[in-house]
Amino acid sequence: MRTFIVLWFGQLASSIGSSMTYFALTLWVWQQTQSATAIALILIFYQLPQMAIALFSGMAIDRISRKRLLALSDTGAACCTISVGILAAFGILQLWHIYVIAAVIGCFGNIHSLTYSTLIPSIVPQQHHARASSMGAIVGYGAGIFSPALAGVLYPSIGLLGITAIDMTTFAIAMLTLLFIQIPPIAKQEREAKIETNKPNVWHNITFGFRYIASQPSLLATMIAMSAFSFLNQIGETLYQPMILARTGGDTEILGTVVAASGIGGVMGAIAVSVWGGFRRRIFGVLAGFIGTGVSKLLLGLGHLPAVWVAGRFASSLHNPLIMSSYMAIWYAKVAPDRQGRVFAADYIVGIAIESSAGLSAGLLADRVFEPAMRSGGWLAVHLGAIVGTGTGSGMAVLYAINATGILLVGAAGFAIRRLRDVEAIAIDR
C-alpha cells in the first residue's frame, strides 16, 4: 500500500489546484454570461473528445508503461491550464478559448483517469481494492473542501493567472511523487497474447472492451444500472452550482460553503468506506448508495435555505465513495489486469456519452423549459410555485428534484433485478 499512498498524496495535491482553476472558471463564465448552458458547455467540451481518444488510450494502457502515461497526461493538462491564465492576464480570454482548452484537457484527462484506475490492482492487494478506490474519492472530495474557499478568496485579487500558477505548483508536487515510485508492469495472460497474435488488427483491439462487456451479462447489467444513475446524477451536478448562484443573487460565499460541504461529505464517506471496507456484496453498496444519493438530492432540490443546501449536498456526497468503490471493486474482480485498459475504456466511453448528453440536456432544459415555466404566472409555477418558489433558479430546483426522484427509483428497482442483484455470484471467464 505504500506505493499507492505516495501516488495518492501527489494526486490529492494536484486535484486541489485543478479544482481551484475549475471553480474560478465557473465564476468567470457566470459573470460573463449568467447562463447555466454556458457553464454546462465547459463540461461538455471536456467530455466529448474523450469518447474518441478512449478507444485508443485503452489499448495504450495495456501496452505502454503506465507511469509514463501518467506523466504525459499530467504534463499536457498543466500546459493547457497555464494557457488559460496567460490569456486572462492579457485580457484576451474569451468563452470559446475555454471550450477549446477544456477539450484538449479532456483528452489528457481521459488518459490519466483510465491509467490511474488500472493501477490499483497492480499495486494494491485484492482485499484492499475497495479501500483504495474510496481513498481515490478523497482526492476529488478533499479538493472540494479547500479549493472553492481558496479560489473564492484569491480570485478577486490574483485572477485566473494567479489561480493557474497555484495549479502549476500542485502539478509539480504530483510529478515529484510520481518520480519516486515504482509501478510494476502488467504481465499478459498467455491466452490473451495468442488471441492478439491471431487478430492483430486495430479494430479488433478497439472493440475488444465492448465485446467483452457484451459477453458478460452480469457486467452489462451493472453498467446499465450505473449509466441510468449517471445520467440523472449528472443533470444535478451540472445544475446545482448555477441554481445556487441564481437563487442567492450570485453569492459566491454561499456557493463556496455548499461546495465545501460537498467535499467534507465525500471525504467522510471515503474514510468510512476505507475503515469499514464496504458491503461484502459490492452490488448492495452500489444500490444502497443510489437510494441515499436520491434522498439527499431531493432535500437539496426542494430546500430554500443555505443550511438545507449544505445538508443535502453533504449527504449526497457522503454516498458517492460507497457507490464508486463498490462499482470498481466489482470490475477489478471480474476483469483480468491485462484486459482492464480496453474494458475500462469501453465502460468509460459509455459513461462519457451518458454524462455529456445529460450535461447538455440539463442546460437546455433549465434555460428553455423549466426556468420560463417556473416564473410567476408560468404553467408549472401554478402547480409547484408554493413548494419551490417562483424566483430565478426555481426552475432548476424543480428539474433537480425530478432527477433526484429518478435516482431513488433506480436504486430501489436494482434490488428487484436478479441479474444485477446476483452479479458477484456469477462466474466470469478471466
Image: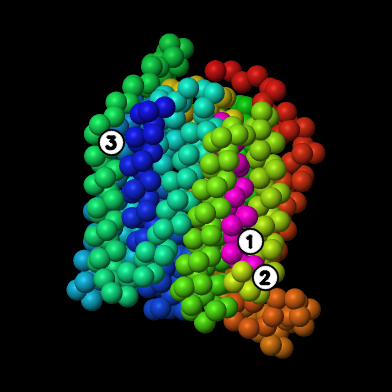
Quadrant where the C terminus sits is top right
Region in magenta: 308-329
Q: Amino acid at mark 2?
A: Gly
Which mark is first along the chain, 2 or 1?
2
Which mark is first along the chain, 3 or 2?
3
According to the picture, the residue beneath numbered tag 2 turns out to be: 303
- Regarding residue 194, the answer to whether it shows in the image is yes
Horizontally, residue 275 falls left or right of residue 63, namely right
- Regarding residue 115, the answer to whether it shows in the image is no
Q: Quadrant of residue 113?
A: top left
Q: Amino acid at mark 1?
A: Gly
Secondary structure of the residue carrying tag 2 is: loop
Secondary structure of the residue carrying tag 3 is: helix
Horizontally, residue 79 falls left or right of residue 205, namely left
Q: Amino acid at mark 3?
A: Leu
Contact (Cβ within 8 Å) of mark 1 with mark 3: no
Give x and y (percent) for residue 81: 28, 58
Residue reaching furthest to the bottom: 377
Give x and y (percent) for residue 427: 65, 19
According to the picture, the residue beneath numbered tag 1 turns out to be: 312
According to the picture, the residue beneath numbered tag 3 turns out to be: 178
